[in-house]
Amino acid sequence: MNPPETNPDPTGPTPPRRSARETYNVVSDTVVGVNVRWRDNLIQAVAILVCMVLGAGVGWRMAGEDADRGPILLGALAGLVAGTILSGAALMVFRFVRHVRGRHD
């Protein structure tokens, strides 16, 4: 019979060290915090702008020829809200998949 192997380090293997930015990204993605990733913010800004323009176009189209700016502004506001929610949800799912795979850029 062989004696059981002894671990020279009783605390176990040392986990890989993360930079302060990586640690912040993990906490901000999983708990709470401001997303400081430039690429994510650019994607969200473009999505919001596109949705806002589409909403203004829908408001203008639904208003008819003799309408003032009210329906266009309401459509733009609806597009702004919808773009914020949809792009945020898309980024949330994207970041969830990245975290599950162990990529916390």
Image (cartoon, rainbow, N blue to C red):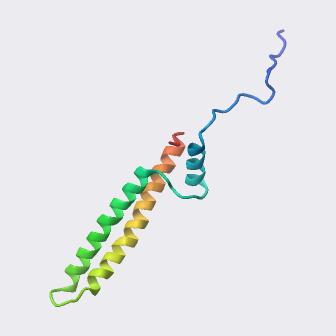
Q: Quadrant of residue 88?
A: bottom left
Q: Quadrant of the N terminus?
A: top right
**Front residue of 80 and 102:** 80
The residue shown at (22%, 89%) is 68
| Residue 90 at x, y percent in the picture | 42, 57
As drawn, 47 above or below 62: above
Which residue appears farthest toward the top when viewing the image?
Answer: 1
76 versus 9 height, above or below: below
Tell me what residue is drawn at x 80 percent, y 16 percent. Answer: 5
* Number of numbered tags placed on the structure image: 0
Tell me the residue at 59%/58% (across/down): 32
46 vs 83, nearest the viewer:
46
Front-most of 18 and 63?
18
- Locate residue 74, reporting x and y percent: 32, 81
Q: Going by the image, does 33 lie left or right of 65?
A: right
On screen, residue 18 versus residue 66, left or right, reads right
Q: Quadrant of residue 16?
A: top right
Residue at the (34%, 72%) spot, across then down:
79
x and y, in percent, of residue 22 in the image: 56, 43
Image height check: is 59 above or below 50?
below
Query: Relative to 67, does residue 29 appear above or below in the rendering?
Result: above
Query: Can you give x and y, in whole percent of width and height, for residue 8 in the image?
Result: 80, 20
